[in-house]
Image (tube, grey):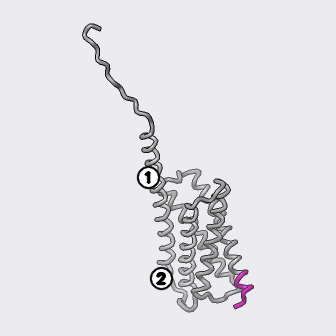
Amino acid sequence: MNKEKLFLFLTSCFILGMVASFVSLMVTSLFDLFLSSKELLALYLFVLTEEALKLIALIFLFDHSFLFPEFSILKTTFSGISLGGGFAFFETVLIFLSNGEVPLEAMAPAMIHLITSIFLALGLNSLFSKNTNPSFKPNFSAYSKIGFAVILHLCYNVFVLIGAWKIQAFQKLLSNKNKPKKTMTKQKKSFFE
């Protein structure tokens, strides 16, 4: 395999991942106008949008890849890693620009995007590969990998949201404990006053 072709392909995967992240940001911003980002429906829509755009990008790469007419599992995995890396890189850059620093918590979404992109790529490989699916019929293996990627991302977002609620509740509890308590002492009044 030619190293220049591989580098060109992985770079195009990375850039296409960044484009998918940008488009995803635009679409989810539109959802954010109508839904609160803490609603469960918004979480579903955000995840479906992100994963659908990554899936479309991978389909485009697999369909228009003149560099690799047949994808092996290794090439498919690397294309998923590269696309997910581009997607996560763009999100991390936006976090850096909004906060001025990249917190350690920004690495968890990056890992989720890498893992889900690998499963999406493997699912597409199961669906479109001539080796594993010569008749190109829909198969359970392909849909289970794609479904697993979507469910994993959704579970991650739900756990982050639940964690955010718990942290906010804990911070509220701490702020109430640190406030000085107003004690009302009853003064005994004498009968003659």
The kind of residue tagged 2 is: Ser
* Mark 1 surroundings: few (<14), some (14-19) or many (≥20) residues within 10 A: few
Instruction: Give the CA separation, mark 1 to mark 2.
Output: 37 Å
- The residue at the point 48 percent across, 69 percent down is 152
Determine if the magenta segment contains residue 5.
yes
Q: Which residue is mark 2?
A: 141
- The residue at the point 57 percent across, 85 percent down is 128
* Mark 2 surroundings: few (<14), some (14-19) or many (≥20) residues within 10 A: some
Label disc, if present, on residue 166 of the rendered structure = 1
Magenta range = 1-7
Find numbered disc 1 in the image and state the secondary structure of the residue it sits on: helix
- The residue at the point 48 percent across, 82 percent down is 141
Instruction: Indicate the quadrant where residue 95 lies.
Output: bottom right
The kind of residue tagged 1 is: Lys
Residue 52 sits above or below residue 77 on the image? above
**Residue 24 x %, y %:** 62, 63
* Residue 90 visible in the snapshot: yes
Determine if the magenta segment contains residue 85.
no
